[in-house]
Image (cartoon, rainbow, N blue to C red):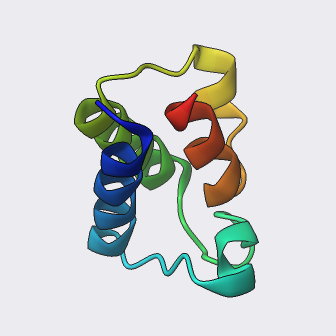
Amino acid sequence: MGSYSKLRKIIHVFHLYGINLLGKRKYDNFYQELKMDKVFVLGLIFELELVTKNQLNDEDAYSAQVPACIIEKLIK
């Protein structure tokens, strides 16, 4: 799967969770600015792993703070 199609799928999942990725919003902290619980963040990461068919290692998943970092790790 090409990186462009992966990015489109990732953006779609973020929009399902109500997370806007335009401009500086892609650097908003899940816990402070977006007010998400750890369970929802891990659910988001799980869905992103399913659509991209990539897996993050556990320490990356548990330490995820901003959408841009997750996107970067999943596209590689």
Q: Is residue 18 left or right of residue 69?
A: left
Q: Residue at x 35, y 36 (%)?
A: 2
Q: Position of residue 26 (x, y in %)?
A: 65, 71
- Residue 5 vertical position relative to residue 30 in the rendered view, above or below: above
Q: Which residue reaches farthest top?
A: 57
Q: Position of residue 32 (x, y in %)?
A: 75, 72
Q: Position of residue 63 (x, y in %)?
A: 72, 35
- Residue 53 vertical position relative to residue 40 in the rendered view, above or below: above
Q: Is residue 69 left or right of residue 55?
A: right
Q: Residue at x 43, y 40 (%)?
A: 3
Q: Is residue 29 left or right of residue 72?
A: right
Specify the quadrant that holds the N terminus: top left
Q: Residue at x 69, y 19 (%)?
A: 59
Q: Is residue 38 left or right of residue 43?
A: right
Specify the quadrant that holds the C terminus: top right
- Residue 72 vertical position relative to residue 35 in the rendered view, above or below: above
Q: Residue at x 39, y 22 (%)?
A: 54
- Residue 66, quarter of picture: bottom right
Q: Nearer the viewer, residue 8 or 2?
A: 2
Q: What is the total number of numbered labels drawn onto the structure image?
A: 0
- Residue 61, quarter of picture: top right
Q: Position of residue 23 (x, y in %)?
A: 68, 85
